[in-house]
Amino acid sequence: MALFENLGGRLGDSLRRIAGKAQLSEDNIREPLRDVRMALLEADVALPVVKEFIDRVRSRALGMQIGKGLNPGQQFLKLVQDELVHLMGDANPGLNLAVRPPAVILMAGLQGAGKTTSVAKLARYLVEREKKKVLVVSVDVYRPAAIQQLATLAQEVGVGCVVSSAAESPLAIAERAVTEARRGFADVLIVDTAGRLHIDADLMDEIRALSAALNPAETLFVIDAMIGQDAVNTARAFNEALPLTGVILTKVDGDARGGAALSVRQVTGKPIKFMGVGEKTDALEPFHPERIASRILGVGDVLSLIEEVERKVDRAKAEKLARKVEKGKTFDLQDLRDQLQQMQNLGGMTGLLDKLPGMGNMAKMVGQNNVTAQFRTMQVIIDSMTPAERADPEILNGSRKRRITQGSGTSIQDLNRLLKQHKQMAKTMKKMKGKNLGRMMRGLEGMLGGQGIPH
């Protein structure tokens, strides 16, 4: 996640300097604390938040008993991690939907924050992971395009959408939507409210009236992680106007400093419940402060990776490949394509490495070498082949190669590189015949080395 990369890099450098110290003292924590302070300020975390954070770390570090099995450097790292978790909200409380159906979720925020997309993402999340029946509605009567956008997204994620028009009042639409949700036995109704380019009295009056009429189970403030210091003022204004229950942080994958987002929780006192990590409708993750703190400090996020694998890996294809390998059968180009697709489902090589302990720098190098783009090119080339060609690449003569490269918009060099890499992988897979998973993973590491990924 780009939002936390720079912060993680700066914090990692300063914390490494204290790693070998025999004990923690005012003298040897002064420089790391200054670096941590600068890293947070450069990441756009609000000054009062930074000051409170540093004061807490300093006072806890100096009064600390070093735990068994930890050296002072490790203890200091754990302390910074604990305080980062505290800054971001300690734990993810999840959504409180234990009310008489339909549970209404009111979405608030400025225009451009990604509110409408977040409605669709949240609807999909609730359907797929919480097994809820969801209905959505837009009360943004000022932008017919927003109403249409939500209808299109609702169709894409497979949830019902209440028809609304600019001729009705937001309150009338919302009340009609509640009636429809009850009639259709929906568990959850998500209401997409109007946004403005800036905070104004009309917007606040309208959303206050909606909140009073709907008595929502959740009122979520949607904020763009790339907004900078304005995030704090916006969060404060919405928090004063509405009984907010949580925050959705969008565009976390964007190339921004993003630290202002970390201030939002402190300013509102409300937890960050979700974060948007991409444009697709499945790119919404629960915000777990302890996991994010681990990623920032390069400790990895294995729990999220395991959850993602459980959810996104096609188990049948994985088992089919494992059986093939055990029996020593040929690893063909269709198998390679399936593996590339599984990798894409898990956010590409960079997304995978980012969640593994100590792999933050490796993820960065992979990103710089554009390995994920190479994988996409390989996939496109294989897609342009016939089933017979995928099963037996040896039949690829000159004219077949020309057809494949023209069809995939790639070059003969790209195709030859793919065939060479596939040959290496097939050879490694053959050696795995009857071997256990550990041996297979070491072979996989060798294959990835063959892809040009730095070790």
Image (cartoon, rainbow, N blue to C red):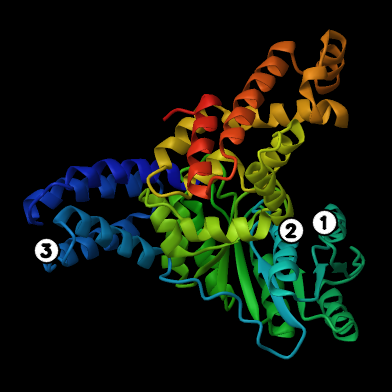
Amino acid type of the residue that numbered disc 1 sits on in the rendered structure: Leu
* Other-residue count near label 1 (Cα within 10 Å), few / some / many at <14 / 14–19 / ≥20: many
Side (left or right) of 103 relative to 389: left
Whether residue 373 is visible, yes or no, is no
Q: In this view, which residue lies farthest toward the bottom?
A: 100
Amino acid type of the residue that numbered disc 2 sits on in the rendered structure: Thr
Q: Are marks 1 and 2 in contact (CB under 8 Å)?
A: yes
Q: Quadrant of the C terminus?
A: top left
Residue at the image position 72 percent from the left and 79 percent from the top: 104
- Label 1: element kind: helix
* Other-residue count near label 3 (Cα within 10 Å), few / some / many at <14 / 14–19 / ≥20: few
| Residue 86: quadrant of the picture | bottom left
| Residue 162: quadrant of the picture | bottom right
Question: Marks 3 and 1, how far apart in space?
Answer: 53 Å
Question: Marks 3 and 2, how far apart in space?
Answer: 47 Å
Q: Nearer the viewer, residue 123 or 333?
A: 333
Circle nearer the N terminus (1, 2): 2
Side (left or right) of 28 relative to 182: left
Q: Nearer the viewer, residue 252 or 193?
A: 252
x, y percent for residue 325 = 64, 42
Q: Nearer the viewer, residue 430 or 159?
A: 430
Residue at the image position 63 percent from the left and 27 percent from the top: 374
Q: Which residue is mark 3?
A: 62
Residue at the image position 87 percent from the left and 28 percent from the top: 388
Q: Which residue is mark 2?
A: 116
- Label 3: element kind: helix
Reply above or below: 39 against 62.
above
Circle nearer the N terminus (3, 1): 3
Residue at the image position 77 percent from the left and 84 percent from the top: 102
* Numbered label attached to residue 153: 1
Circle nearer the N terminus (3, 2): 3
